[in-house]
Image (tube, rainbow, N blue to C red):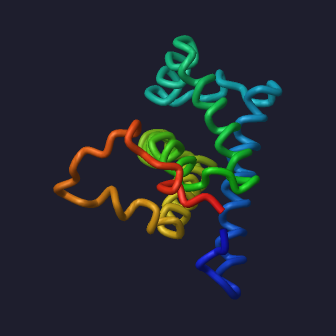
Amino acid sequence: MQSEVTGPMKYVILWFRLLFGAHLIYSGMRHFLGFEVLSGVTHPVGGPFVRIIAEMGIYQLVKLIELITGIMLFCGLFVPLVLVIEFPISVVIFILNFFIVAQPRQLFSGPQEIVLNGILLAFYGRYYMPLLNPLSPPRPIWKAKWSDTKLP
């Protein structure tokens, strides 16, 4: 499918997509390769929060989602869907890093996460426009046609 964006803006969007994808891949790989130390979070609220979600298996799931969404962003696959999947994770990371832990590294990484995701959501915003209809009638998936996907 031909891109609706041309010229330099096409490369700006590509740069943001690759940057966010690389960030997510790095974050996921750091965890799975053992370079991330969960016991290093010493904040009285943030530390127990991270340890508890790790004990429940949620932290590992989040890192797996980051890794998969990062690879998909880097490859340009299902980008609008991936951005929506990653957004709640970005919000939690932003709140935890910026408002709760608020140490120098987290003051950069929390906003970076939400800003990159937000910018890319705006770049791909026209995919979400049909979702903003306040009186949307049901459209069951079993009544969909392949032509609805607008594949190339």
Give the quarter of the figure containing the N terminus.
Answer: bottom right
| Residue 18 coordinates in the image, percent (x, y) | 73, 60
Q: From the viewer's perspective, is residue 52 above or below residue 76?
A: above
Front-most of residues 26 and 78: 78
Which residue is more in the foreground, 21 or 4? Answer: 4
Task: Point out the image quarter for the C terminus.
Answer: bottom right
At a point 47% along the width and 67% down the height, the residue shown is 122
Q: Position of residue 100 (x, y in %)?
A: 43, 40
> Which residue corresponds to the image point at 49% horizontal and 61% vertical from the top-left?
121
Q: In which quarter of the image is residue 14?
A: bottom right
Q: Where is residue 149 in the image (x, y as percent from the top left)?
A: 52, 54
Q: Can residue 42 be seen in this view?
A: yes
For the question of whether residue 94 can be seen, the reply is no
Name the residue: 53% across, 50% down. 146
Residue 96 in the image: above or below residue 122: above
| Residue at the far top in the pictured view | 55
9 relative to 48 in the view: left or right = right
| Residue 120 placement: quadrant | bottom right
- Front-lying residue, 85 or 112: 85
